[in-house]
Structures are given as structure tokens and as C-alpha cells.
Image (spheres, helix red, strand yellow):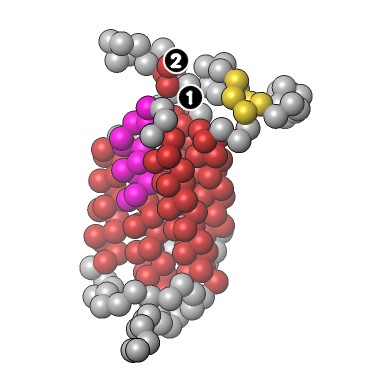
């Protein structure tokens, strides 16, 4: 399989199902941002963190590929009126979001209560989590914009929302594990 196809040389690309769209299309921006997020999660996984966290991140990366495939599919070709899939693509499910919630609950049990917003930083690994969280929020915003124009499965938006929360909790957990300083944001009094 060749990596280059030359079919995008004029500024268009194909969705799964064959529909061609401009490379600036909001659908492309949405799944491109999910791809960027997946790369940042790979960067977090490459750090010196506990093996069970690396396993969780691999599972998340797998789900992000699924989510990207959903977003890269022409919604008019994705399902029949009967609800059966025309194209053989996986889906994001309620259980995928519940998994993130369970992992957040497990991490939060070992963390001090949060009383203030915290400034991103304190350790490089923690900073990578905050960058990934911000990219996840951007993916969520772009996917919400896409939803205003075309159908997007609700579970996709829900998963992105949960994942940004997960990345925040992971940043706090890693701050704790790495014994980094968590700096609270305390607004200046006027």
C-alpha cells in the first residue's frame, strides 16, 4: 500500500464511503483534531508513568481511532433507515464513557479534594496532559460545530467531554505521583 495517492493534490479528500470534501471541511477539522489529540496521548504514554496508566491510555487511543473513523464517515452512507450499518465501522458506546468515569473515580479517591482551579504545569508529563486536555476540548468544540451542520452520534460528543475531564484528573494524579507542585489559581483581589 502506497502512502501517497495524489488524490488530494487539489485540496480535497475522501470521507469513508467515497464522498469528496475540501480539506478545510469541518468534518476534516474534527477528526484531524482527534488525530492530534491521539498523538499527544501517545506522548503522555511515552513518559515514565505507571504501567496500568499506559494500558488505559492505549485503550483510549484505540477509542480515538474509532471516534475518528466515525467522524471520517459520510453520515449519509453510514447507516440505512433500518439502523443497520452500510459501512463496516465500529462505534463509540455508552460503556466507553462509563469506563472513563470509573477511571476518574479511581484516581480521585487517592487525590486531595480540589478547592481551586490549578495552573497547568509543575512537571513536563503533567503539562502534556494539560495540552492534551486543551486539544480534546478543541476537538469537542469542532465536533459540536459539525453537529450543527450534519449528524454526529451523541456518544462521540459525550466521549470527548468525558475524555477532557479524564485528562484533567490524570494530570492531577500524575502531579501527585511525581510529587510535583500543584499551584492553585487564586484570583487577585481588586
Q: Is residue 143 left or right of residue 116?
A: right
Residue 75, above or below 41: above
Name the chief secondary structure element in magenta.
helix
Q: Are marks 2 and 1 in contact (CB under 8 Å)?
A: yes
Query: Within 10 Å of the Cα at label 2, are there few (<14), some (14-19), or many (20+) other Cα atoms?
Result: some
Residue on which disc 2 sits: 77
Residue lying furthest bottom:
189
Question: To which residue does mark 1 refer?
Answer: 73
Q: Nearer the viewer, residue 13 or 162?
A: 13
State which region is magenta: 151-162
Q: Quadrant of the N terminus?
A: top right
CA gap between label 2 and label 1 equals 7 Å
x 46%, y 32%: residue: 71
**Quarter of the rendering containing residue 103:** bottom left
For label 1, the crowd category at 10 Å Cα-Cα, with few meaning under 14, some 14 to 19 and many 20 or more, is many
Horizontal and vertical percent for residue 48?
A: 52, 66
Seen at 42% across and 30% down, the residue is 149
* 156 in the magenta segment: yes
Q: Nearer the viewer, residue 26 or 6?
A: 26
Q: Is residue 176 above or below residue 51?
A: below
Q: Can residue 179 be seen in the rendering of this structure?
A: no
Q: What secondary structure is found at the residue carrying circle 1?
A: loop
What is the x, y in percent for residue 10?
74, 26
Percent of width and height locating residue 55: 43, 51
Measuring 26% from the left and 71% from the top, which residue is drawn there?
110
What's the residue at 47%, 58% (across, down)?
Answer: 134
Amino acid at each position: 500500500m502506497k502512502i501517497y495517492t495524489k488524490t488530494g493534490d487539489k485540496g480535497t479528500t475522501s470521507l469513508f464511503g467515497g464522498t469528496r470534501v475540501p480539506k478545510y471541511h469541518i468534518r476534516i477539522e474534527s477528526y484531524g483534531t482527534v488525530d492530534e489529540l491521539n498523538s499527544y496521548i501517545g506522548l503522555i504514554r511515552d513518559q515514565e508513568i505507571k504501567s496500568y496508566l499506559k494500558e488505559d491510555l492505549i485503550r483510549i487511543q484505540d477509542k480515538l481511532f474509532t471516534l475518528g473513523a466515525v467522524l471520517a464517515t459520510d453520515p449519509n452512507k453510514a447507516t440505512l433507515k433500518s439502523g443497520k450499518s452500510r459501512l463496516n465501522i465500529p462505534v463509540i458506546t455508552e460503556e466507553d464513557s462509563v469506563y472513563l468515569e470509573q477511571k476518574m473515580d479511581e484516581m480521585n479517591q487517592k487525590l486531595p479534594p480540589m478547592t481551586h482551579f490549578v495552573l497547568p504545569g509543575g512537571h513536563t508529563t503533567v503539562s502534556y496532559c494539560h495540552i492534551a486536555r486543551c486539544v480534546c476540548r478543541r476537538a469537542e468544540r469542532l465536533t459540536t460545530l459539525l453537529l450543527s451542520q450534519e449528524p454526529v452520534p451523541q456518544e462521540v460528543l459525550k466521549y470527548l467531554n468525558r475524555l477532557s475531564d479524564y485528562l484533567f484528573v490524570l494530570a492531577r494524579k500524575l502531579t501527585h505521583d511525581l510529587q510535583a507542585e500543584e499551584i492553585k489559581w487564586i484570583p487577585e483581589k481588586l
